[in-house]
C-alpha cells in the first residue's frame, strides 16, 4: 500500500491509538450522532415515524440493523473517470513481449511516475487490480480501448509467472523481473493470489480459442496446482501468544486476508473447471476464515474476521466479501451468515469510531479486549473491501440497508472522513494515497489507491 512517501510500501499491524466506545443511548438522544453515521431522516417524517427513524439509526450503531424505509445515504456518488488510470498505464517490452503495465507511484503536484528503489516501477498486484477494473467495465459494454488494455495487462501478468508456478511481483526500470526482493519473490503471497483473481476476471473477456486464453488456462492450472500442494488441510487451531486460538492452514498460517483473495479467485476457477480438488480447497479456506471470526453482536470486536493472528487491518480485508461469494455459489448458508454478521455488527462499529486502519486484540478471562488500534493511515484499499462486502450483501438479500452501508463507506472517498477532504477527484480520476492524520492527506495518487477507489465507486454504479 502507498502511504506517507511515494516510494515505500508499508504494512501497519500495530499502533497505540485508542478510542472510547459511544453508548447506543448517546446516539438515540443525539441527532448529530445519526448524521455522523451517514444516515438522515427522510424529509417530511413526523411523529412516530421520526421516533422510529432515530431508534433505527441508533440500532445501526449498536448492531448494524438499519432499514432503507427509514434511512438513506447522502450525497450522491460522483461518476467514474478513467483519465488518471490511463495516465498510469504505459507500454513496456518484457522478455520480448509487448505488454501494458501500471506505474505504481505518481507524485503530486505533476503526478509524474516514481519507481521504488528496491522494488521497481510496476507490479502484478496492480496489474491484476487493473484487469478486475477493466473486466467490470467491459461487463457493462464493449470498449475497444479497455479491451486492448485488459489483454496487454494480462500479457504482463502471464510474463511474470516464474518457473515454479508462482508469480514475481515487480518489474524493474531496466526491464528485468525483480526475482529477489521480499515483496517480489515468486511465492504463495498476495501477488500470486491476486494474479489468480485477475486472470480469471480476464478470461471472461478474452477471445475464446485464442492463444491468450490458452495461456491463461495453463497459467491458472499451474498456480492452482501449487495451492493444492502447498496449503495444508485443517482443522488445527494452536493458541496464539495473546490468548487467541487461530487456524494454521491458511496462507501465512492464519492469513484470512490472503485466504479471502484466494477464495475469490478459486471460486471463478471452480465455476469454469468444476475441479473437485479446487472445491475442497475453497471450503478449507472458507472454514479457516470463519475460524478467524471473533466477538458477537453484543461483545467486542463484534463478529469481525481477523486478518492474521490477533490483528485486523482494513487494507485487503476481503474476508466477509469472500464468504458471501462462497456461500452463494457453493450453497453454504453458514458462510453467508458469517459474512453478514461482520457487516451487521463490525461495520457500524467502524463507522462509529470514524474508521480504523487496524486493530489488535487479546483475550483475557474469556473476553476479547482491545490491545491497540490504529486510526491512520486510512486508504482506499481499506475502504473498497467493505464497499464490496456490503454491496454483495445487498445483492444477496435485497435488503436496502446493506446498499446504504456500502454507499456510506464509499463516501469516505468524497469527503465523509476524519479529514473532511475528498480523496477522489472526479475531474481527473485521481484518488489520493490516503489520510495520514486528522487534517492531512497524502496528495500523491498511485496505482493502488486509484484502482481501489475506482473499484469501490464502480461497484455502486
Image (spheres, helix red, strand yellow):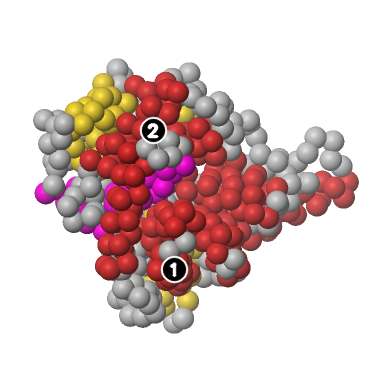
SS label for mark 2: helix
Task: Name which residue lies at 66% across and 39% down.
Answer: 73
- Of the 4 image quadrants, the one containing the N terminus is top left
**Can you tell which mark lies on residue 276?**
1
Residues rendered magenta in the picture: 180-204
Residue ID for mark 2: 150
Q: Measured from the top left, where is residue 345 in percent x and y?
A: 58, 61
Q: Residues within 10 Å of mark 2 (few under 14, many from 20)?
A: many
Question: Could you tell whether 113 is left or right of 128 in the image?
Answer: left
Quadrant for residue 224, please give it. bottom left
Locate residue 222 relative to residue 143 in the image: left or right.
left
Residue at image position (44%, 82%) is 365
| Residue 200 lies within the magenta run | yes
At x 31% / y 51%, what residue is drawn? 218
Indicate the secondary structure of the residue bearing disc 1: helix
Q: Which mark is residue 45?
A: none
Percent of width and height locating residue 347:
55, 54
Q: Position of residue 307 (x, y in %)?
A: 39, 61
Query: In this view of the protein, can residue 419 be seen by the observer?
Result: no
Return the residue nearer the eye: 425 or 258. 258
* Residue 357 sits inside the magenta stretch: no
Amino acid at each position: 500500500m502507498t502511504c506517507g512517501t511515494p516510494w515505500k510500501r508499508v504494512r501497519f499491524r500495530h499502533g497505540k491509538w485508542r478510542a472510547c466506545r459511544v453508548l447506543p443511548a448517546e446516539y438515540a438522544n443525539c441527532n448529530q450522532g445519526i448524521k455522523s453515521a451517514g444516515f438522515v431522516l427522510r424529509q417530511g417524517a413526523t411523529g412516530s415515524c421520526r421516533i422510529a427513524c432515530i431508534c433505527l439509526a441508533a440500532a445501526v450503531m449498536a448492531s448494524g440493523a438499519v432499514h432503507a424505509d427509514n434511512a438513506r445515504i447522502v450525497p450522491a456518488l460522483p461518476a467514474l473517470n478513467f483519465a488518471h488510470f490511463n495516465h498510469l498505464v504505459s507500454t513496456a517490452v518484457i522478455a520480448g513481449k509487448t505488454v501494458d503495465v501500471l506505474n505504481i507511484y505518481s507524485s503530486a503536484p505533476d503526478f509524474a511516475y516514481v519507481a521504488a528503489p528496491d522494488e521497481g516501477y510496476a507490479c502484478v498486484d496492480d496489474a491484476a487490480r487493473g484487469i478486475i477494473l477493466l473486466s467490470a467495465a467491459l461487463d457493462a459494454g464493449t470498449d475497444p480501448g479497455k479491451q486492448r488494455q485488459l489483454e496487454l495487462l494480462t500479457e504482463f501478468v502471464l510474463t511474470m509467472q516464474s518457473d515454479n508456478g508462482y508469480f514475481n511481483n515487480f518489474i524493474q526500470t531496466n526491464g528485468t523481473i525483480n526475482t529477489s526482493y521480499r515483496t517480489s519473490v515468486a511465492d504463495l503471497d498476495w501477488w500470486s493470489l491476486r494474479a489468480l483473481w485477475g486472470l480469471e476476471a480476464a478470461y471472461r473477456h478474452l477471445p475464446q480459442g485464442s492463444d491468450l486464453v490458452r495461456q491463461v488456462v495453463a497459467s491458472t492450472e499451474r498456480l492452482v496446482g501449487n495451492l493444492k500442494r502447498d496449503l495444508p488441510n485443517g482443522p488445527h487451531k494452536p493458541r496464539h501468544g495473546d490468548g487467541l486460538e487461530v487456524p494454521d492452514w491458511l496462507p501465512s498460517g492464519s492469513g484470512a486476508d490472503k485466504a479471502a483473495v484466494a477464495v475469490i479467485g478459486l471460486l471463478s476457477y471452480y465455476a469454469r473447471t468444476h475441479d473437485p480438488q479446487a472445491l475442497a480447497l475453497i471450503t478449507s479456506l472458507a472454514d479457516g476464515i470463519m475460524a478467524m471470526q471473533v466477538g458477537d453482536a453484543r461483545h467486542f470486536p463484534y463478529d469481525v474476521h481477523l486478518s492474521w493472528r490477533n490483528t485486523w487491518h482494513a487494507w485487503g480485508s476481503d474476508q466477509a466479501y469472500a464468504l458471501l461469494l462462497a456461500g452463494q455459489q457453493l450453497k453454504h448458508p453458514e458462510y453467508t451468515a458469517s459474512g453478514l454478521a461482520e457487516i451487521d455488527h463490525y461495520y457500524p462499529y467502524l463507522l462509529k469510531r470514524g474508521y480504523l486502519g487496524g486493530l489488535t486484540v487479546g483475550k483475557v478471562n474469556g473476553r476479547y479486549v482491545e490491545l491497540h488500534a490504529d486510526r491512520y493511515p486510512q486508504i482506499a484499499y481499506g475502504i473498497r473491501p467493505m464497499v464490496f462486502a456490503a454491496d454483495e450483501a445487498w445483492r444477496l438479500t435485497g435488503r436496502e440497508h446493506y446498499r446504504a452501508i456500502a454507499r456510506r463507506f464509499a463516501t469516505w472517498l468524497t469527503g465523509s472522513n476524519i479529514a473532511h477532504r475528498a480523496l477522489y477527484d472526479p475531474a481527473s480520476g485521481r484518488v489520493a494515497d490516503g489520510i495520514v492524520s486528522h487534517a492531512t492527506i497524502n496528495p500523491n495518487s498511485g496505482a493502488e489507491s486509484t484502482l481501489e477507489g475506482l473499484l469501490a465507486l464502480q461497484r455502486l454504479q
